[in-house]
Image (spheres, rainbow, N blue to C red):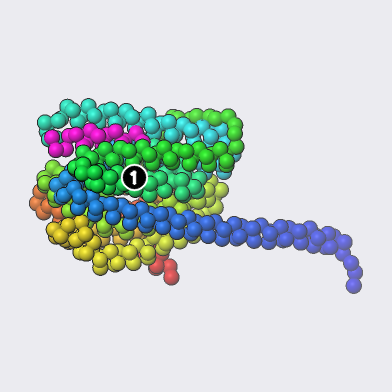
């Protein structure tokens, strides 16, 4: 048997190549599993924090409704809804774009821009939030007679919350982008409601009227306290984990990138709050409080969606930056299933306990149980496409995502204006459910057409 030197050389060259490929495969597989487990841990942590927050918020809302009475509670709900909407848009969508831009800068090694965005985004939120607060104050003064005395002073006090609410919302996105879930979630969702409830309890024990003005004052302290604590937490993590160095600011690019996300985020706020705001034009404060209790009870289902989206957003952006299409596709399908099945279970449990939960607010609030039966359809439609907006944004489909969100928001406003005068609370619930279902169908269609991804639970189940 003759020995072929050229064949031996070729074999020797192939073996290291195969070994390197095997090592690369195992490393990639291990990294993927680690990333999957990390996302699952984050999702569980986020869900636990939001569940604890939901318990605190729910308990506090029950206590407030009992202490304040249905009318004053309805006014407070209206004021806080305005804070949610205007505080949520005051960071111009940069809070959402952080979850795409920060992982992108980190993956591509653009640390000057990374550091600049960490600092500049927070200043942007505070400055714009302050301007919005001043504008809200002057608008309220200009339309004081139309608004009415009962709403005016609480609303003016609520405007003071806007700058620090915007800062907290921005730092929520920053924390999720960095994987700092405790920093992102604990101050706004645990500390803020606890501070508000504690202050209202002190007022109640001291014999001070626990009306909508007192609640608005407590909200100011709670918002500022949560924002300050969160800012200190963020700065501590930045000092420990982000290397010192020069900063570069690209404000034009950041805002331009964020505008479609602002449209998405603002549309989300409309879908969540338009019903309450429109109801205030047609029904008394008592009805607003009743509807708010029913809708927010049913909205507990959406915490699963938020938990999964918060956990996986940074990973979608990182996978897209690396160009790992296969892993991203599998990850998106997993995220949909992590969202839908727990949401379905949660919806069944909440509906089963719906009337007793509403009774805790007030015996009369049980009349709003049909609102929950209608809203559950919309929330489950939304859960059926998982964190669709995060997937589309990570793939650079912000504009398509914005078109879907704005379309659903416009539909929601139109339906609320058309149905509430005719059907009251049932009309508001129907408008919201139809709009959420429409958004879900459009998200699934856009994802399939623009990216080739199946992000609907029905599409995924057909594959099995």
Q: Quadrant of residue 159?
A: top left
Could you say which is closer to the camera, residue 408 or residue 61? Answer: 61
Which secondary structure is most common in the magenta stretch?
Answer: helix
Q: Which residue is mark 1?
A: 195
**Which residue: 26% across, 58% down?**
298
Q: Is residue 155 magenta?
A: yes
The percent position of residue 272, horizontal first and vertical second, equals 27, 48
Q: Quadrant of residue 2?
A: bottom right
Q: Is residue 223 magenta?
A: no
User: Can see residue 392?
Assistant: no
Magenta-colored span: 149-166
Residue 235 is left or right of residue 342, and the answer is right
The percent position of residue 361, horizontal first and vertical second, equals 20, 56
**Which residue: 39% across, 60% down?**
339
Q: Quadrant of residue 242?
A: top right
Residue 213 is left or right of residue 379, and the answer is left
Could you say which is closer to the camera, residue 106 or residue 69? Answer: 69
User: Can see residue 297?
Assistant: yes
> Up-down: is 57 above or below 127?
below
Q: Quadrant of the N terminus?
A: bottom right
Could you say which is closer to the camera, residue 402 or residue 266? Answer: 266
The percent position of residue 88, horizontal first and vertical second, equals 33, 40
The percent position of residue 273, horizontal first and vertical second, equals 25, 46
């Amino acid at each position: 048997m003759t020995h072929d030197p050229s064949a031996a050389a070729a074999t020797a060259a192939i073996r290291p190549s195969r070994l390197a490929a095997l090592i690369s495969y195992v490393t990639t597989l291990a990294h993927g599993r680690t990333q999957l487990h990390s996302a699952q841990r984050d999702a569980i942590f986020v869900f636990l924090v939001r569940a604890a927050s939901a318990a605190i918020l729910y308990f506090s809302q029950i206590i407030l409704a009992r202490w304040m009475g249905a009318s004053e509670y309805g006014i407070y709900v209206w004021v806080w809804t305005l804070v949610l909407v205007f505080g949520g848009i005051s960071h111009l969508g940069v809070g959402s774009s952080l979850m795409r831009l920060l992982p992108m800068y980190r993956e591509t090694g653009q640390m000057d821009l990374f550091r600049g965005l960490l600092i500049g985004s927070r200043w942007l939120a505070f400055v714009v939030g302050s301007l919005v607060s001043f504008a809200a104050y002057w608008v309220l003064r200009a339309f004081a007679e139309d608004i009415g005395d009962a709403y005016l002073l609480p609303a003016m006090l609520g405007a003071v919350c806007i700058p620090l609410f915007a800062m907290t919302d921005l730092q929520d996105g920053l924390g999720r982008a960095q994987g700092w879930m405790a920093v992102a979630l604990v101050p706004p969702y645990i500390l803020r409601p606890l501070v508000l409830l504690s202050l209202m309890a002190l007022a109640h024990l001291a014999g001070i009227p626990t009306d909508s003005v007192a609640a608005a004052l407590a909200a100011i302290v709670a918002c500022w306290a949560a924002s300050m604590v969160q800012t200190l937490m963020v700065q501590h993590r930045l000092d420990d984990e982000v290397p010192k160095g020069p900063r570069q600011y690209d404000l034009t690019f950041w805002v331009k990138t964020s505008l479609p996300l602002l449209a998405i985020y603002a549309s989300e706020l409309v879908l969540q709050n338009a019903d309450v705001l429109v109801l205030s034009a047609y029904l008394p404060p008592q009805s607003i409080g009743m509807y708010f209790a029913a809708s927010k009870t049913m909205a507990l289902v959406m915490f699963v969606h938020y938990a999964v989206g918060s956990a996986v957003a940074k990973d979608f952006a990182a996978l897209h930056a690396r160009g790992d299409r296969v892993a991203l596709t599998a990850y998106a399908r997993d995220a949909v299933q992590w969202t839908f099945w727990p949401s379905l279970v949660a919806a069944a449990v909440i509906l089963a306990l719906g009337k007793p939960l509403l009774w805790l607010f007030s015996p009369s609030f049980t009349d709003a149980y049909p609102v929950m039966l209608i809203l559950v359809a919309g929330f489950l439609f939304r859960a059926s496409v998982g964190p669709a907006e995060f997937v589309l944004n990570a793939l650079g489909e912000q504009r398509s995502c914005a078109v879907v969100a704005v379309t659903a928001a416009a539909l929601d406003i139109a339906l609320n204006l058309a149905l509430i005068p005719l059907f009251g609370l049932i009309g508001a619930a129907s408008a919201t459910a139809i709009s959420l279902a429409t958004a879900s169908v459009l998200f699934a269609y856009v994802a399939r057409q623009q990216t080739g991804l199946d992000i609907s639970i029905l599409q995924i189940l057909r594959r099995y």
